[in-house]
Image (cartoon, rainbow, N blue to C red):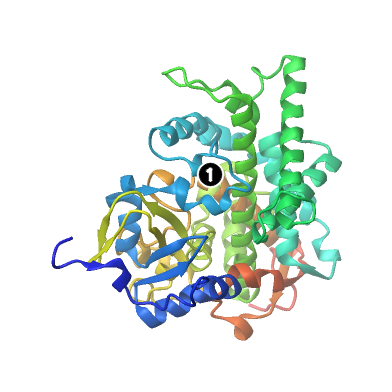
Amino acid sequence: MTDKLKSAEMMPGNTGLPLIGNTVSAFTKFEQFYWERNQQHGNIFRVSMPGLFNNIACLVGPEANRLVFKDEADKLSSRLGNKFLSPILTPDMVLMQDGQQHRISRKLILPVFLPQAIASYFDIIQAVVSETIDNWGRQGTIDLSAELHKLTLKMVVKIFLGSEKTSEIEQVSEWFTILVDSLNGVIKWDNPLTMHGRGQAARRKIFDYVRQIIQERGARGDLEQSTDVLSLLLNTIDEDGNRFTETQVINQAIGFLFAGHDTTSSLMSWLLFELGNSHEWQQRLRAEQQQVMGNNPITISQLRQLPDLTNTIKEGERMYPPGFLICRMAMADIEYGGYLIPAGWFVCIFPQLTQRMPEIYQNPDTFDPDRFAPPREEDKKQPYSLIGFGGGVHSCIGVELAQMEMKIILSTLLQKYDWSVTPTTAEIAPVRRPFSMQKQLRAKFVPINPLQGGVPEGWGG
């Protein structure tokens, strides 16, 4: 260590009580815990969670993001940084890999997310969205987060597993909900009496279901001709002869289900919250759609013809990023901000904290999609200022698919409904705990008359 570098133990921050550190506060306050410490200690601070994450260097801002995604990426392990997801994601999953293994897996997965593959999912997504939201206007007040969770999970089950039967989709969705909820289980004992055990039982059922699909298609002899995700994963071979085994394909599929539904449903919940509290933006987006496609459903060629809709989704990503924090483990010593972070420490960066920095974004707690339009383009002031879908070699490989899903959902809702959401922005903004608060959101959808240009009665000019 040079004389100029301080030990990481000298980072500001209260490391909590003996034996338990900050664990209780972090798991009861969730995102609020890091907001408070960021406000108290600045953009470099430490926390401690003995037995879980031990020592954590918490870094906020574009330079910290660059450190993790680029400058010191080869010294940071995503596999070890995300070990808390191991009940869901096995080492086969690309997020849980590093180095050469990660590069091989990502290359084999790439065909699933190439433009022509994503285009082939368009009709499936549009059909699921139209069918699912058709009765939202007749339900009165709905649990927004729960309904979006069902919608996005149904989409990914059909896209990634090719399931067609409603009963099977509902069953897989039920299993997967149990599996995701089991992450909150403190006792990691694979027994039906524990949340973790029930989650692992659900995971085994999903695994067996996917394996049965593969075997049935193999028996029919149509695996090589199919273009669905399972078939693409099984049939892809890179130039070096690498390919996935059946078990690896199943584990990748389970990983896709996790990454593909939870991130989209969370971000959509808060987008609808903001739009439900801004009739001005609802009107503006409808006017844009009316100009591009009239009263017809959106087509795939029109997805890029709606700049206001694109910027609205980017603003949702900025304010309510799909991942509140991104974790890595240092595999070698790292220098940052005058400190030496030793090997074995966790390094965490925080998209939401960076993306609410007033030095980058004007009035950062205000919903303002125009901040991404020329000439403002606030996200371009500094590299790594908008990282809602990650960055570097571990950036979200499915981001284009997620954005297509969100555009189809928003476009369809805007054509069919006016909506409002409670609690209102006046009651809970600025939202500092989106993941823990989204279950509070309730929405009321009111059908609109397309013959009036899609503008609900009573809105005026």
Expressed as whole percent of the image width and height from the top left, the position of residue 15 reads 43, 75
In x, y percent, where is residue 148? 71, 58
Location of mark 1 (residue) = 398
Q: Furthest residue to the bottom?
A: 426
Q: Position of residue 455 (x, y in %)?
A: 69, 68
Closer to the camera in the image, 161 or 283: 161
Instruction: Indicate left or right for 128 with 266 as reference.
Output: right
User: Which corner quadrant of the image does residue 65 belong to?
Assistant: bottom left
Figure check: 350 above or below 238: below
Residue that extends furthest to the left in the rendered view of this protein: 3
The reply to whether residue 34 is in sight is: yes
Residue 339 shown left or right of residue 432 in the figure: left
Up-down relation of residue 442 to residue 296 (above or below)? below
Which residue type does callout 1 highlight? Gly
Q: Nearer the viewer, residue 205 or 149?
A: 205
Q: Is residue 412 visible?
A: no
